[in-house]
Image: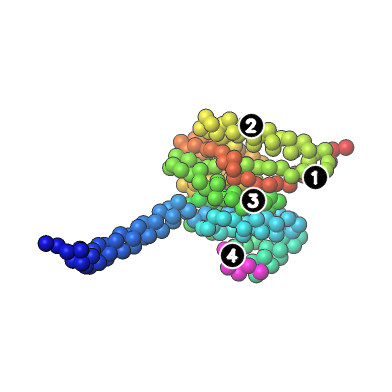
Amino acid sequence: MITITQLILFWAIFDIPYLLYRLVLYNLYRKDLCSIEKPFVSVIIPAYNEEVGISKTLHSCIHQNYPNFEVIVVNDGSKDLTAERVQRFKQQNPHFRLVLINQKNAGKAKAMNNALKHTNAKFVITLDADSWLHPNAIEHIMAKFSSENIGAVAGNIVAVSHKRLLGYIQKIEYGISTHFLRKSQSVIGSVAITPGAFSAYRRIALKKFQEGTLTEDFDSSVKILEGGYEIVGAQNAICFTLTSPVSHK
């Protein structure tokens, strides 16, 4: 007859080590699963004469809840203190993964393609230097890559206008585009254009940005769709962008 003492002894010798073994396996699996769900991302910020707002943009990046990303700022031949502002931010935050690339002025598309040459990330995010992110923006925009056929994700652009006529016009334009058109397009499975201010791309679908054109956002989107990928919107991935200070008189 097996006594209670013998059962407890058997459980202590065999069951506890087995449970510990299963717990270790679970933690290892969970760690791998988290790394799959949080792939490494490169945030590309092309900048030309952005000394006024670039620090605010970088501050919004460093406060992101997403754990696995770097920021690449491409100084596109700025004539002001853009490079110095970025370098100072890098020195003040030595543990933040920030790369500064200086190039002769060649335009936004070439600046972004230059950044692509300096990263092996399978996902990239484009962010304008006069825009700043909600702390959960990268987390939410990356969550949309739930299947392999998603080639790009359009962020939710919220315009912050200057108190001038053009600013209000642009704010209305952003509102219509983001909150109505993009939402309806996302429901049917496709967003027409990824906004340059804040969008995420699967690298294999993007390959490179179209150079020599003023509509690199549209051209890149068309190539992604032609490649058989889908573009969706992320309404909860919020990016604030400053509208033009120039007024119409």
Which mark is drawn over residue 180? Answer: 2
Is residue 109 a member of the stretch shown in magenta? no
Image coordinates of residue 110 in percent, x first then y, are 61, 51
Mark closest to the chain's N terminus, 1 or 3: 3
Secondary structure under tag 2 reads helix
The quadrant the C terminus occupies is: top right
Label 1 CA crowd tier, 10 Å (few <14, some 14–19, many 20+): some
Residue 22 pos. (x, y %): 30, 59
Q: Which residue is the site of mark 3?
A: 133
Image: magenta residue range: 92-97
Tell me the amino acid under the disc marked 2. Phe
Q: How far separated are the C-alphas under marks 1 and 4?
A: 31 Å
Q: Is residue 63 left or right of residue 20?
A: right
Q: Which quarter of the picture shows residue 235?
A: top right
Mainly helix, strand or loop, the magenta region?
A: loop
Residue 162 is labelled as 1
**Residue 112 in sight from this viewpoint:** no
Q: CA distance from mark 4 to mark 2?
A: 36 Å
Q: Which residue is mark 4?
A: 96
Q: Earlier in the sequence, mark 2 or mark 1?
A: 1
Instruction: Name above or below for residue 14 compared with residue 249.
Output: below
